[in-house]
Amino acid sequence: MIIVCISVVVIFFLGTFNPDTTSSRVSLYEEPKSDNVKIDSAAGTVETLFATSDTAGLAKILSPTSLAQRRQYFSDLKPYMPAFGKDFRSRKLLYATPRFAVYEFISANGRFTTEFCLGDNGQWMLMSF
């Protein structure tokens, strides 16, 4: 009898659990929203740089690691850049978080992806293509 009385008092003062009232809280498993406008702006810049074969501009938008790995191939890459720029127009954003994004695009040779990351300077950078 005492347990029942204590339970009634606790329920009365603390209320009952209502899942609808907790929906405004952020779950530990929810990721913050990505800024798709800024991500697409960076993708548009990449498209323009490739379409105009601008390797100097490409060096500025590549992540530091990617630049270190790919700079030596810029002269070999230059003749293929306009075709990449044209194919990259068909891009579709597959996945985006506040710090990482993946685009897919189609070319005559199949489907490919490009990856972007948010740099330490707050700018979106190309990681792989």
Image (cartoon, rainbow, N blue to C red):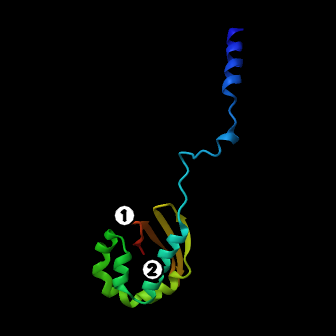
Left or right of 57 on screen, residue 42? right
Residue in the image at 46% along x and 63% along y: 100
Question: As drawn, which residue projects farthest toward the top?
Answer: 1
Residue 3 locus on image (x, y percent): 67, 12
Q: Amino acid at mark 1?
A: Asp
Q: Amino acid at mark 2?
A: Val
Of the residues tagged 1 and 2, which is closer to the observer? 1
Look at the image and tell me in which quarter the C terminus lies. Answer: bottom left
Residue 41 locus on image (x, y percent): 50, 75
Q: Mark 1 or 2 closer to N-term? A: 2
Residue denoted by label 1: 120
Look at the image and tell me in which quarter the N terminus lies. Answer: top right
Q: Is residue 48 above or below residue 128?
A: below
Left or right of 54 on screen, residue 15? right
Q: Quadrant of residue 36?
A: bottom right
Secondary structure at badge 2 equals helix
Q: Quadrant of residue 60?
A: bottom left
Q: Is residue 31 above or below residue 69?
A: above
Left or right of 15 on screen, residue 74? left
Q: Quadrant of residue 64?
A: bottom left
Q: What numbered label is drawn on residue 87?
A: none
Residue in the image at 32% along x and 74% along y: 67
Q: Is residue 128 above or below residue 24?
A: below
- Distance from disc 1 to disc 2, alpha carbons, whole Å, reads 19 Å
Residue 37 locus on image (x, y percent): 54, 71
Crowd rating for badge 1 (residues with CA inside 10 Å; few <14, some 14–19, many 20+): few
Left or right of 86 on screen, residue 23? right
Q: What numbered label is drawn on residue 46?
A: 2
Residue in the image at 45% along x and 62% along y: 99
Residue 105 locus on image (x, y percent): 53, 77
Residue in the image at 31% along x and 82% along y: 73
